[in-house]
Image: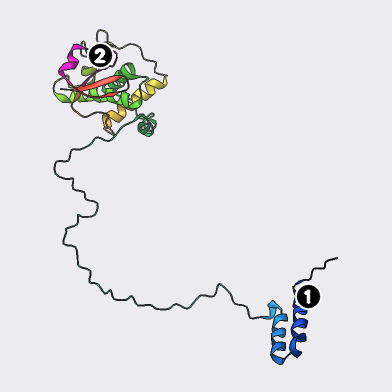
Amino acid sequence: MTRFFGAGGASAIVTTCIMAMSGATPAAAEVANAAVTPLATTTAYSIATPVKAVSVSPSTPSVAVLPSTRAMPASGVTTPPAGAVPVRPAVTHESLWPMIWANMNGPALDEELSCVATAVYFEARGEPFDGQLAVADVVLNRARSGRYPSTYCGVVKQPAQFSFVRGGQFPRINTQSAAWGYAQSIARIAQARQVQALPDDVLWYHADYVAPGWGHRLSMVEKIGAHIFYRS
C-alpha cells in the first residue's frame, strides 16, 4: 500500500538522507536543520509594505527640440478650408426618434402650427419621419420665401396646392391616432428648427407615382420616402 507523507514527514526523510551522506558534516547538518525549519518561524514580509521611493531626475535630451513655426488654431476653433461647402446633417427616421418622443407632449399647437401638422398628417402619415419632416419643411420654406403666402395656414390652404384641401377646408382628423401625435411632434421640431430634412430653398414636391408637367422645369434635390423634392 502506498503511503503519502505530509510536508513535515517529507522534510524529516530528507534530513535523514542528508545526514547519512558522507558522515553528516556540520555544514550538511546546518542545511538539514534549515530544511526542517517550519515556514511559520521564518521572518514574514508584508507585500503591503510600501517601497521606499527613489528620486530619478529626467535625463537631458541629447537632441534639441525646436518649437513649431506653424501657428496653431485656438482650442475648439476650426477654420474650414477655402471653398468648403456646408453639408446638411443627415436626417433619418431613426435619428429623429428621440426628438419625436421628446416633442410628443409639448404645448398645444396654435392655429398656424396646427396647419403644418395637418399638412404632415394628410400628405405624409405612414411615411418615415424624415419624409414627414420634409413636408413640414416645404410648408415653412414657402411661408418664408416671399413667393407664397406668408402664413403657414395661407400656404397650406392656397388653392390648387395641396390636394387634400377642399374649398379651403380640411378633412376630419383622427386626433386620437398615433399619426396625429407624430404630425404634431414633427410640426414642433420644424418650427423650432431643431433639425431640417431639406434646405431652405426647397419649395416643391410631388409623390413618386405621378409626373407633373412642372417637374422638368425644376432641379430635383432628393427623394425621401414616397416624395420627390425640388428647388428652382
The residue at which mark 1 appears reads as 9
Distance, label 2 to label 1, CA atoms, is 101 Å
**Quarter residue 45 falls in:** bottom right
- The residue drawn where x is 47% and y is 78% is 52
Q: Secondary structure at mark 2?
A: loop
In this rendering, is residue 25 above or below 160? below
Q: Nearer the viewer, residue 27 or 219?
A: 27
Asked if residue 103 lies left or right of residue 43, the reply is left
How is colour applied across the structure in the image? rainbow
Q: Earlier in the sequence, mark 2 or mark 1?
A: 1
Q: Are marks 2 and 1 in contact (CB under 8 Å)?
A: no
Is 166 placed above or below 131 here? Answer: above
Q: Is residue 86 above or below residue 131?
A: below
| Amino acid type of the residue that numbered disc 2 sits on in the rendered structure | Phe
Residue at the outermost front position = 22
Mark 2 = which residue?
162
Q: Which residues are magenta?
A: 203-218
Does 42 sit left or right of 59 as displayed? right
Q: Point out residue 232 in the picture as x, y percentages from the top left corner.
A: 15, 22
Q: Residues within 10 Å of mark 1 (few under 14, many from 20)?
A: few
| Magenta run includes residue 201 | no
Mark 1 residue type: Gly
> Residue 77, image x and y in percent?
21, 50
